[in-house]
Amino acid sequence: MVPVSYYLVLSGILFMCGVLGFLLKRNIITIFMSIELMLNGVNLSFVAFAAQWHALSGQVFVFFVMVVAAAEAAVGLAIIIAVYRTRETLNVDQVNLLKL
Amino acid sequence: MTPNPYLWLIPILPLAGAAINGFFGRQSSKKAISAIALAFCGGAFLLALWIAIGFSSASAPYYFDLAHWLRSGDFHVDFSFYLDQLSLVMMLVVTGVGFLIHIYSVGYMWDDDGYYRFMAYLNLFMFFMLTLVLAKNYLMMFIGWEGVGLASYLLIGFWFTKDSAASAGKKAFIVNRIGDFGFLIALFLLIQRFGTLDFPTLFAKIQPMSPETAGTGLLTAIGLLLMVGAAGKSAQLPLYVWLPDAMEGPTPVSALIHAATMVTAGVYMVSRSHMIFERAPTALTVVAIVGTLTALFAATIGIAQTDIKKVLAYSTVSQLGYMFMACGVGAFSAGIFHLMTHAFFKGLLFLAAGSVIHGVGGEQDMRKMGGLRTYMPVTFVVMGIATLAIAGIPGLAGFFSKDEILWQAYSSPNGSWVYWLIGVITAFITSFYMFRLMYMTFSGDYRGGPGAHDGAHQSADAHALADKYGQDSHASGHSGHGEPHESAWVMLGPLVVLAFLSVVGGYVGIGGRFEHFLAPVFDPGLSGGLGQKAGGETAGQLTERLLMGISILAAFSGWFLAWLLYSNKPQLPAQIAERLGGLYKAVANKYYVDELYAVLFVKPLLNGSTDILWHGVDQGVIDAAVNNSADAARDVSDNLRHMQSGNLRSYAGWVAAGGAIVIAYMVWMGVR
């Protein structure tokens, strides 16, 4: 059986990839995808622990996360389309009106 | 006759008049205002007369408790009035002279826009002054004391649009504050030591105490502090500086407040507190020395003044010095006697000076008067009588009272020939500057400029205006005024009455009768004061005659010198002034006392307030604390504001950084 630490390391790598993508990418779609990557990194650690302890709650939680992610994707993509229609760009550095 | 139960009405009546005129005067006609002011003041006078007629020494002193005021444990202060021989005399002088001056004011102030205000203030002053003299305890007296100060301030600054008048009012108030501070501390000491401010109770407690010989006791301290208060109110050294400036007020005010009544409050207070002073010889000596020095000092300044009212002001300071000299040698009744006669002739002098100023259109400089005898015969006569009285020419009021003081200063146990000598020198100087004033004003030719010849009378407004701006309007007041003219009878009437009193006022003192009348107040143990006096040894009588002769000589020689210099050889004074040089300049500039005070007290206070308190403490510490903390908050916020860039990735960066810090913290702290 693969030790749980392997899963956790992979989970951490996935999460860090998400974080770096979120920080470094300018395209809003890519940033969105980075968020999904982070979520899935967390999901991986959930299911790893669920398998380790033979507890269902971790797997159930993963479903919740996926539902929320799906809902978020629906709303987020709608916002992105709305932003693109008004600003004609997907570069987040140019979408910076919300400031003091 | 039983004591009069309406005593309390005497102060209240003028207060009612002040209230009516003060609240409704603006809408009333001047006739109605005059009627109310005169009715309430005259009512008080008539009531005072009625009480005086029913007064019997047997039932004095008489108390009247109007209402409770402060009751705290054993300490009681009530609204109560006190009538004995001393307050009776003061009450009659205040209401009598006050009423005459009210009448005079009707004529003098008729054309002024603030007529109702003036009358209301005058009535208010009467209320406070009567409260002062009729008070049964020191706190009531203090109410009156502060109240007359307020009325004085309001009336000095009556023409408040004129800068000098406004600042003169302020000066009077501030200088008086210094004196009042001393008075107040004396009251605290009395409360602390005796637990009461009530005159009869207090004096009954003090009476058995023996005099403090060592010179440093509680009574001495109280006496000295009371004297500080009296020096402020009665314009004695070193607090006299406000009185000459107070001449910025309308002339009736100068007559009523700054000559006849208010400034004598200090003398009254010291006399009322004689029980304390008699047991504090050091304090009494200080009173005598202050009085004597003030008398001489102010008289010398009076020589070189050219403003007619300033001469009278310094004369008032000097005469008040006489009264304190009398009190200081223990001759309180002589002081009160001089207070009374002084109220008559000095009130008259001021009112006559007002008549002169009115007649020449607001001019106060005596160098621009002269020859007014032909234009203003009545004023000339009454002012002449007053001058004779103040100079101490035999037969008039001033002679009796001044001679009484000089004799007491020489002969009483506390007295000394030094007081007497300075008193006689002062009498000589007084006689000199008063006759100088007469000659400069009334004899010779009118020196009033071109206005003297055009002869055309302007409207009454021109007077009021010219008078209003006093000495500031030399040129304008004159060109439009026309030749000098006699005042109306509403003004001359009071002058004539006061002139009559200045002549006969002294005769109540013949044979020690006045002293005998006041004896129950000042000498409770002594019933046969008159008999003792009359039975004095012949050597003493001879000395008294001799001293009287010398003071008469001084009075006449002062007159002669004034005649010589200002009537016979009018070019001489200028030559003498030139010969004296610096000395003359010092006298003409009032010994630079105002300048000295400015350097010693006003400047340091002003600079200290500006540099230390204002710029240093207020701006540097208090404002700075508030401003700097606000600035700091703004600077920090200004820097933090840049975090809110609107840039999504920078937000993300902050979130990541925060997360990293949290994780690092947890790792470092070993949280698992």
Image (cartoon, rainbow, N blue to C red):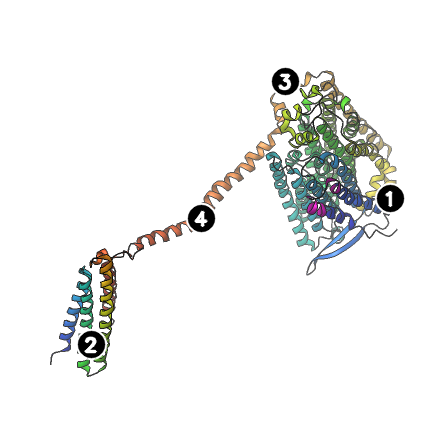
**Above or below, B456 relative to A70:** above
- Give the quarter of the figure containing the C terminus of chain B: bottom left
Asked which secondary structure carries label 2, the reply is: helix
Q: Residue furthest bottom?
A: A54
Instruction: Residue under label 4, please give it.
Output: B623
| Numbered disc in front, either 1 or 3 | 3
Q: Chain of mark 3?
A: B
Instruction: Residue under label 1, please give it.
Output: B528
In this orientation, does residue B415 appear?
A: no
Cα distance, mark 1 to mark 3? 56 Å
In screen coordinates, is B164 left or right of B636?
A: right
Cα distance, mark 3 to mark 2? 117 Å
Cα distance, mark 3 to mark 4? 58 Å
**Label number found at residue B198:** none
Q: Are marks 3 and 2 on the same chain?
A: no
Query: Is disc 4 in contact with disc 1, using a CB cutoff of under 8 Å?
Result: no
Q: Chain of mark 2?
A: A
Instruction: Residue under label 3, please give it.
Output: B579
Predominant SS along the magenta part:
helix
For the residue pair B447 and B624, the one nearer the viewer reads as B447
Asked which secondary structure carries label 3, the reply is: helix
Magenta part of the protein: which range? Answer: B18-33
**Above or below, B159 relative to B632:** above
| Numbered disc in front, either 3 or 4 | 4
Q: Mark 2 belongs to which amino acid?
A: Phe
Q: Are marks 3 and 4 on the same chain?
A: yes
Disc 3: CA contacts within 10 A as few (<14), some (14-19) or many (>=20): few
Q: Mark 3 belongs to which amino acid?
A: Arg
Query: Is disc 3 in contact with disc 4, using a CB cutoff of under 8 Å?
Result: no
Magenta stretch: includes residue B231: no
